[in-house]
Image (cartoon, helix red, strand yellow):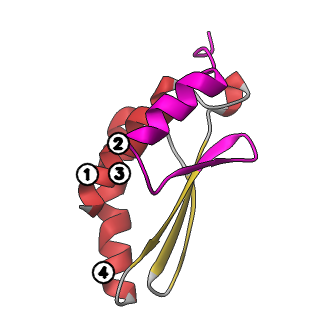
Amino acid sequence: MAAPRLTESEIATALAALPQWRYEAGALRRSYRFPDFVRAFSFMTACALIIQQMDHHPEWSNVYGSVEVTLVTHDSGGVTARDVELARRIESLAA
């Protein structure tokens, strides 16, 4: 059974605690910038351990020192509490 989608109001409340994340095209999105590829890839590696543990995999990409993250629960057709929780955990690694 798919997780319930969050309402626009619930998403806005969640984003208040995640100020650099944005809600765009039905997904949570965030861009990270690092001084070089090694730091960007190290960040992704640290995230991968949490992502695998949660079994909730983002759409993401890396080009040199940048990492683009998109979170959406495809089988629910939108953003769910799982996406918000993963955003919080990713954000804690970036801090």
- Camera-nearest residue between 92 and 52: 92
Residue lying at 51% horizontally and 44% vertically, measured from the top left = 57
Q: Number of callouts in the render?
A: 4
User: Which range of residues does the magenta coloring cover?
Assistant: 1-28
Find out whether the residues at labels 3 and 1 contact each other: C-beta distance under 8 Å. yes
Find out whether the residues at labels 2 and 3 contact each other: C-beta distance under 8 Å. yes
- Residue 24 appears anywhere in the view: yes
- Left or right side of 7 for 67: left
Label of residue 88 in the image = 2
Which quadrant would the C terminus be assigned to in this image? bottom left
Dot 2, how many residues are within 10 Å of its Cα: few (below 14), some (14-19), or many (20+)?
some
Label of residue 90 in the image = 3
Is 8 one of the magenta-colored residues? yes
Is 19 one of the magenta-colored residues? yes
Task: Point out residue 84 in the picture as x, y percentages from the top left corner.
Answer: 45, 35
The local secondary structure at tag 1 comes to: helix
Find out whether the residues at labels 4 and 2 contact each other: C-beta distance under 8 Å. no
The local secondary structure at tag 2 comes to: helix
| Spatial CA span between label 3 and label 4 | 15 Å
Label of residue 92 in the image = 1
**Tag 1: residue type?**
Ser
Residue 12 occupies which quadrant of the picture? top right
Find out whether the residues at labels 1 and 2 contact each other: C-beta distance under 8 Å. yes
| Spatial CA span between label 1 and label 2 | 6 Å
Dot 3, how many residues are within 10 Å of its Cα: few (below 14), some (14-19), or many (20+)?
some
| Spatial CA span between label 2 and label 3 | 6 Å
Q: Which of marks 4 and 2 is in front?
A: 2
